[in-house]
Amino acid sequence: MMMKHKANMAMVFVQIIYAGMPLLSKVAISQGTNPFVFVFYRQAFAALALSPFAFFLESAKSSPLSFILLLKIFMISLFGLTLSLNLYYVAIDNTTATFAAATTNAIPSITFVLALLFRLEAVTLKKSYGLAKVFGSMVGMLGALVFAFVKGPSLINHYSNKTIPNKAVPSTKNSVKGSITMLAANTCWCLWIVLQVRHSLTVTSCVQRTDSPILFY
């Protein structure tokens, strides 16, 4: 049973890690770290950590890089890493960690719409999974909108200003700017997912049934 669902379990584990990243990132940026510098160091450390695995485990499986393949890698990197991460950390500088984590609920919905536009996904309302996709997309998007537009009482007054930096509490103007930027970051991230799937389908010449669920984050 575990082997059958290992991909789903791995995705759940990844999402748990992602939930903690906005908290750590917000702390670092609130202490004065430049968002663009933060992205650079994050990717540099990731490259150092992953390069041994790529060299020893994947080097024998590598194939020649054509111009088309390099172009595809460039586009995927542009949307998934450069634009998405830089916009994300600019947004988190103007919003809260809770908002950043909550708005990721919109990623499956945006991915679903983009997959439809790229013809990588099909909606079959007569099937249970088709209804689940539409309903799940609506719930995820509504949850993100609630966090974006519903403002509750602030809890910051219960704490000392010495313990929480003033920059950690965004103004209304910064919140609007952060919300728009976060939406753009999530859209770039969704496009990154779709482009990877489209590229993998091209490379493997994988033919999917028109009514099969092939992508839902």
Image (tube, helix red, strand yellow):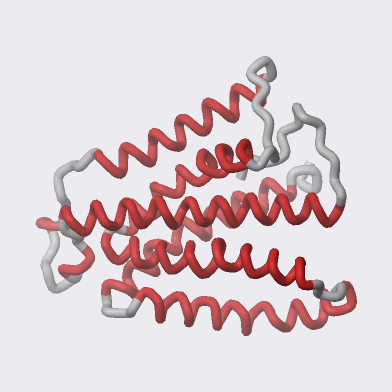
Q: Is residue 212 left or right of residue 134?
A: right
* Point 32% across, 73% down: residue: 29
Q: Is residue 170 left or right of residue 124?
A: left
Foreground of the two, 98 or 162: 98
* Point 46% across, 53% down: residue: 186
Question: Considering only vertical position in the picture, is 140 above or below 174?
Answer: above
Which quarter of the rendering shows the C terminus? top right
Q: Position of residue 71 (x, y in %)?
A: 69, 68
Q: Quadrant of residue 214?
A: top right
Q: Is residue 29 left or right of residue 62?
A: left
* Point 48% across, 51% down: residue: 187
Q: Position of residue 173 (x, y in %)?
A: 17, 56
Q: Position of residue 24 (x, y in %)?
A: 39, 68
Count of numbered circles on the image: 0
Which quarter of the rendering shows the N terminus? top right
Question: Considering only vertical position in the picture, is 139 above or below 27?
Answer: above
